[in-house]
Image (cartoon, rainbow, N blue to C red):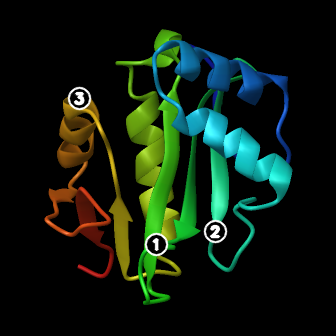
Amino acid sequence: MGSESVTLRRVHALDGGIARLAGEADSEGHRFMRRLLDEWCSGANRFNGDGEFLLGVDINGQIAAIGGLNLDPYAADARICRLRHVYVSSAARRNGVGSLLVKRIIFDASRSFATLRLRTATPEAAAFYERLGLRKSNQEAATHILDLQA
């Protein structure tokens, strides 16, 4: 992030920029962004429960990254949240955008939840989350976990 204008914002409606991100993710073999669109359109997940949100990062007015927070559907504890659908456009990678996004999500999550969990499928993403302080988990429903009350 050099001299670009970077803005974090809550996402309340999907737009063409988010569809573009989903298309890019699909082309890289990441289906979770398509699932984000499908679940939003069906109403199954609009990140609108207590403490939930979808956050976007705009660079020079164009969405470059997205990620959300839900009550963890795999946990029976309302104090556990799940980091979901984090994607950074290829053009915005390796310049701090992903870290900015996830750190903000973690900060906001700590206001409503005690524990954050996620599942990732790639070693690169696992290493990214570990650099941000999440630890590997042996729980069936999560590859990584973070105590938000520590």
* Whole-percent x, y for residue 2 in the image: 47, 14
Circle 2 residue:
52
Looking at the image, is mark 3 or mark 1 earlier in the sequence?
1
Q: Mark 3 falls on what kind of element?
A: helix
Looking at the image, is mark 3 or mark 2 earlier in the sequence?
2
Is residue 12 visible to the viewer in this orientation of the structure?
no
Q: 39 and 81: which one is in front?
A: 39
Q: Amino acid at mark 1?
A: Cys
Task: Report if the CB atoms under discs 2 and 1 are less than 8 Å apart.
Answer: yes
In the picture, measured across the screen, residue 21 lies left or right of residue 130, that is right
Indicate whether 135 appears above or below 30: below
> Which residue corresponds to the image point at 46% horizontal and 80% vertical from the top-left?
113
Checking the image for residue 81, the label placed there is 1
Q: Mark 1 falls on what kind of element?
A: strand
Is residue 87 visible to the viewer in this orientation of the structure?
yes
> Which residue corresponds to the image point at 70% horizontal and 17% vertical from the top-left?
60
Q: Amino acid at mark 3?
A: Glu
Quadrant containing the C terminus is bottom left
Decide: few, some or many residues near mark 3? Use Cα within 10 Å; few <14, some 14-19, many ≥20: few
Q: Amino acid at mark 2?
A: Glu
* Whole-percent x, y for residue 68 in the image: 58, 53
Looking at the image, is mark 2 or mark 1 earlier in the sequence?
2
> Which residue corresponds to the image point at 33% horizontal and 75% vertical from the top-left?
148
Q: Mark 2 falls on what kind of element?
A: loop
